Image: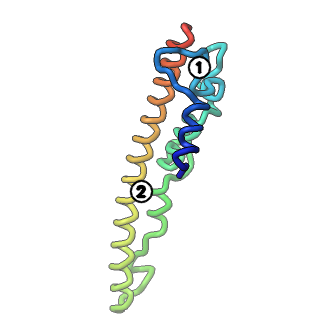
Amino acid sequence: PATPQEHADLLAANRVDPGIAKDELFIELGAYEDPASGKTLPTSPVEQLRHDLERLQGATGEPSLQVHLTFTELTERDLGGWQAAADFKHTTDQVHLTLKETIERVSIVYASVLQALDETVKTAKNADQAATGA
């Protein structure tokens, strides 16, 4: 943490006056959208996150994490009929169930984060436009 003197120096060097709007952008809109058309760029951070989420969910033609997990499930035919195999299968079934639930939770959280980021970009864009009078 900064010392009290460093803190005071930082405040003095970076004076903030909420009553004065500056002609500055809070975000680099060029990284998020095409300035000429206003359309979202596929290379924007939000769109890259959206593509990652779709990939994890299998929407891009690649198998989803759920599908990959299903391929790893063991059956009694894989293990045989002896007791140790049955115990092992029971354990792996529990692990698969836990992993499936975790994947679902991760997808939900990922989608929520993506939505929050998308809304943050829109809010920053609106604030930038309001501050610059555009």
Q: Residues within 10 Å of mark 1 (few under 14, many from 20)?
A: few
Q: Secondary structure at mark 1?
A: loop
- The reply, left or right, for residue 5 in relation to residue 86 is right
Position of residue 133 measured from the top left corner of the image (x, y, whole percent) = 54, 7
Q: Is residue 89 above or below residue 117?
A: below
Q: Residues within 10 Å of mark 2 (few under 14, many from 20)?
A: some
Task: Decide which of tag 1 and tag 2 comes sooner along the chain.
Answer: 1
Say which residue appears at 61% left-offset and 24% top-offset.
Answer: 29
- Residue 68 is labelled as none
- Residue 39 is labelled as 1
Q: Is residue 67 above or below residue 12?
A: below
Tell how many labels. Answer: 2
- Residue 103 is labelled as 2
Q: Viewer-proximal residue, 12 or 104?
A: 12
The residue type indicated by label 2 comes to Ile
Q: Viewer-proximal residue, 76 or 95?
A: 95
Q: Is residue 102 above or below residue 40?
A: below
Q: Secondary structure at mark 2?
A: helix
Say which residue appears at 42% left-offset and 53% top-offset.
Answer: 106
Position of residue 109 measured from the top left corner of the image (x, y, whole percent) = 40, 47
Position of residue 80 measured from the top left corner of the image (x, y, whole percent) = 40, 86
- The reply, left or right, for residue 101 in relation to residue 53 is left
Q: Viewer-proximal residue, 22 or 133?
A: 22
The residue type indicated by label 1 comes to Lys
Say which residue appears at 65% left-offset and 17% top-offset.
Answer: 35
Please identify the quadrant where the C terminus is shown: top right
Colour scheme of this structure image? rainbow
Say which residue appears at 35% left-offset and 66% top-offset.
Answer: 98
Q: CA distance from mark 1 to mark 2?
A: 32 Å
Q: Looking at the image, which residue sits at the far front?
A: 5
Residue contact between numbered discs 1 and 2, judged by CB atoms under 8 Å: no
